[in-house]
Image (tube, rainbow, N blue to C red):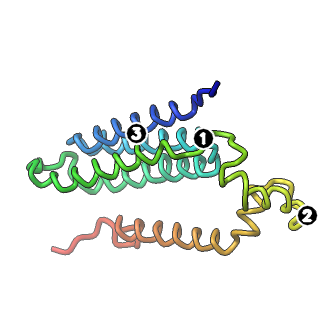
Amino acid sequence: MQTVDLTQYFDYVFMAMLLSVGIAVVRLRSLFAAVMLTGVYSLLSAVWFVSLDAVDVAFTEAAVGAGISTVLLLGAMLLTSRECNPVPASRHSAALAVVVVAGALLFYALGDMPVYGDPNSPANAYVGMEYMTMTVDDIAIPNVVTAVLSSYRGFDTMGEVFVVFAAGLGVALLLGLGGAAGKRED
């Protein structure tokens, strides 16, 4: 008899919640409510990442997606109007088609994911197990996640830091935090 994997049902529930919040964000006219719901979307994404056993990605999504991004969007919202102008539905048909096709493909691919905890899945059978067994001997750091991020992926992590710094600098310049904020020429 085959056992039922409940985490796959949770994955479907989380995807449905993300889909409904995403539709609500698109349909709203209030920018404040849209910003708040994007924070909710990020928190739901973080919960889903925890369900997928990607806790480090979940922490990053919660901190950056729900925390910093929401604060930056609220700051940017202060520089714009509170309501957006209505857009005709005909302009959204191509974007809706792309989103529906991409969502259908994601739902189709979700069934091919390995069962949670399957020892024969690619994440548990090949390079991942090699990292788990050899990290302590190679680096002498008992926490495998810290060892992989700080040593094996050091250059990649440094690149990610540069990307985050460049994004933050770009947002600061867009918000006018370079010293010319609030000054207008007549």
**1 or 2: tag closer to the N-terminus:** 1
Number of labelled discs?
Answer: 3
**2 or 3: tag closer to the N-terminus:** 3
Between residue 176 and residue 34, name the one nearer to us: 34
Residue 88's spot in the image, x, y percent? 8, 49
Which amino acid, mark 1? Val
Residue 92 lies left or right of residue 54; in this view the side is: left
Q: Residue at x 88, y 60 (%)?
A: 136
User: Considering the numbered disc 1 on the image, is that residue within a helix, a strand or a loop?
Assistant: helix
Contact between labelled residues 3 and 2, with CB atoms less than 8 Å apart: no
Q: Residue at x 69, y 69 (%)?
A: 153
Q: Residue at x 33, y 35 (%)?
A: 20
Task: Tell me the quarter of the image containing the C terminus.
Answer: bottom left
Residue 68's spot in the image, x, y percent? 49, 52
The disc at residue 137 is 2
- Placement of 144 over or under 55, stated as above or below: below
Which amino acid, mark 2? Asp
Using the numbered discs, state the Cα–Cα distance from disc 1 to disc 2 in whole angstroms: 28 Å
Between residue 162 and residue 153, name the one nearer to us: 153
The disc at residue 50 is 1
Residue 132's spot in the image, x, y percent? 80, 56
- Placement of 82 over or under 5, stated as above or below: below
Residue 137 lies left or right of residue 84; in this view the side is: right
**1 or 3: tag closer to the N-terminus:** 3
Label 2, residues with CA under 10 Å away: few <14, some 14-19, many ≥20:
few
- Placement of 26 over or under 72, stated as above or below: above
Q: Residue at x 54, y 38 (%)?
A: 47
Between residue 42 and residue 35, name the one nearer to us: 42
The disc at residue 18 is 3
